[in-house]
Amino acid sequence: MRKIVTIRTEETVPGPEVVLQAQGLPPSATPNDQTLALYRAAISTYLLLSQPVAMYSQISIDDFRSVFNGDGANAKDAPLGHIYPRSDALALFAVTVGETLTAEITRLFETNDFPAGAMLDSVASQAAEMAAACVEREYLNDLKDSGTNADATATLPFSPGYCGWNLSSQIPLFHALHPEEIGIILSESCLMSPLKSISGVFVVGPKEIFQFDDKFDFCEDCQTRSCRARLAAIRSSA
Ligand code: SF4
């Protein structure tokens, strides 16, 4: 199962709360008029310039092994290493909000318009996350239509460079998925272009395979602790 997914821009517009929190505003704080005006201007630019597109490709546990292992640099306790062998289904994915938007962010910074640049950068990052959620839903719907995930009860995305999965695994991931078909290329240092792109693997399986803590060495530098909210959502889902 392999698919290129065109995503409607309107599906990926992040609300002010998530964008402003990403910029460091505490959840309890009320943004001032100037900040809200910057947010609205960034959303207008996003709607004009973004071109969200994604793809996924299902992969077997055996074939994923070499993608996960990469050049052998993963952390010993990387949670994904314990999770994927017990999954029901796996799919590599890549998603981007496009090069035109990235170029506009660069232009704003280069012309010293830092407030507008930083706001558009945050909007684009959150939008890319929302685009990834769109392709995850598409993959799950396709799985259900094919009748192959009868036992699956939860899904979690993982990306190289996070949670102990070494960034160098981008190389085998790109060899297996070919995200260049949707305009995403990989640099020698394993960074994606356009910059506002996300790649990784969707892991589908029983809830119990996704339980792990956040006390690994590699968690010390983690700013988001995003696994906590995701695992809580899995635990509370029906
Ligand atoms: S705390 Fe951060 S690095 Fe550690 S498992 Fe959770 S998301 Fe990954």
Image (cartoon, rainbow, N blue to C red):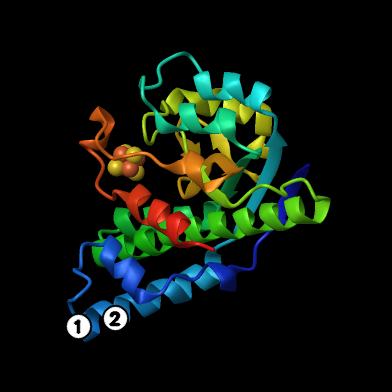
Residue placed under numbered mark 2 in the picture: 36
Q: Locate residue 217: give its quadrant.
A: top left
Q: Nearer the viewer, residue 179 or 83?
A: 83
* Amino acid at circle 1: Asn
- Image check: 150 left or right of 13? right
Q: Residue at x 48, y 68 (%)?
A: 46
Please say if 150 is above or below 116: above
* Residue picked out by circle 1: 32
In this orientation, which residue lies closer to the viewer: 235 or 13? 235
Q: Amino acid at mark 2?
A: Leu
Residue 133, placed above or below residue 57: below
Quadrant where the N terminus is found in the figure: top right
Q: Quadrant of the C terminus?
A: bottom right
* Count of numbered tags: 2
Front residue of 1/36: it is: 1
Helix, strand or loop at label 1? It is loop
Q: Quadrant of residue 67?
A: top right
Q: Quadrant of ligand 1?
A: top left
Q: Residue at x 40, y 16 (%)?
A: 73
Label 2 packing within 10 angstroms: few (<14), some (14-19), many (20+): some
Q: Are marks 2 and 1 in contact (CB under 8 Å)?
A: yes
Q: Residue farthest to the bottom?
A: 33
Q: Position of residue 78 (x, y in %)?
A: 39, 28
